Amino acid sequence: MSAPIPEPGPDAVLRRAVIEALIGVAILSAMDALVKGLAGHLPVIAVTFLRFAFGAVAALAVAGITRPGWPSAETMRVNGFRALLIVFTALCFFYALSVLPLAETLALAFLAPVFMALFGAVLLREIITRRVVIALAAGFSGMLIIVFGKAETGTLGPQAMLGAIAALASAVTYALAMVLLRARATRDSLVVIVTLHNLLPAIILVFPALIVWTAPTALQWGWAALLGSLGVAGHLLLASAFKRAETGRIAPLDYTSLIWAVLFGYVFFDEMPTLFTFAGAGLIILGALNASRR
């Protein structure tokens, strides 16, 4: 008889989780850059619909292979409300991507962990600590620095201001959606959650997308298919990483997306973040990291 295969040790499990998280963040950062490119040619609502429609196809394919079982009525009810939040989050975030530089949009969206702590206190009865209050103040200060930087450089027009507001709104609703997910994560299958995360928003967006529909070119259809696949792959990798390791070990890795945002923004969109963007992002990240500590 062959010897049993030894179970991987905690260090090996953590290394795998870190690698999965880093790859997942990189994939989702590439998705953001692709959204920005498509939103320059197609309506934001149409791009959002295509992202979730092709994501639903990819997620259903995974569900067909893994066969996680049908979701319960309670699962559908909770995820139905989450789907509305996800649609609003995506529309706001994708609009912000279409009018703001990648790095600025990501930096403003990094306020989400602070809002998660606030919603966790309200909905899950978690304690609001001094760290959360400090994080909120730091995040708000960082946001003001980024906005002030745009005003100082003469790039804070009405469209840019609306984009900044949209990015902040997306951080709020994303945080609420994640708190609801945290409450269900131990009860529902990972594949079911990711499938509903894509399928329900696609259904919600069908009619709004038809109203503003502009027929994509053959190349844009291909990019849209890649967009949905990247979203599913990135979220599956991140969910797997969070399943293998503590949240405190994995969550900070999300901030590596700022590196990708700077790189993709420079290479594909000729964007170079200002010192105001880096300073504001630094404050927001430090605040969010502080809020995430136990």
Image (cartoon, rainbow, N blue to C red):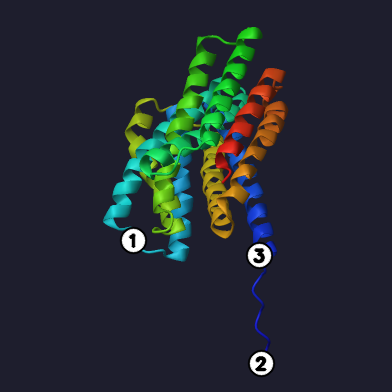
Q: CA distance from mark 2 to mark 1?
A: 39 Å
Where does the image place residue 92, in percent across and percent down from the top left? 46, 27
Q: Nearer the viewer, residue 3 or 124?
A: 124
Q: Circle 2 sits on which residue?
A: 1
- Tell me which label, 3 or 1, sits earlier in the chain: 3
Where does the image place residue 69, in percent across and percent down from the top left? 37, 64
Q: Where 73 sits versus 163, above or below?
A: below
Q: Name the mark on residue 119.
A: none
Where does the image place residue 75, in percent across and percent down from the top left? 32, 53
Q: Where 203 sits versus 261, above or below?
A: below
Position of 33 compared to 194: left or right?
right
Depth check, mark 3 against mark 1: the one in front is: 3
Q: CA distance from mark 3 to mark 1?
A: 33 Å
Q: Where 66 sits versus 143, above or below?
A: below
The amino acid at mark 2 is Met
**Disc 2 secondary structure class:** loop
| Residue 39 seen by the camera | yes
Q: Circle 3 sits on which residue?
A: 10
The amino acid at mark 3 is Pro
Q: Residue at x 54, y 41 (%)?
A: 227
Q: Circle 1 sits on which residue?
A: 70
Task: Mark 3: give few (<14), some (14-19) or many (20+) Cα within 10 Å.
Answer: few
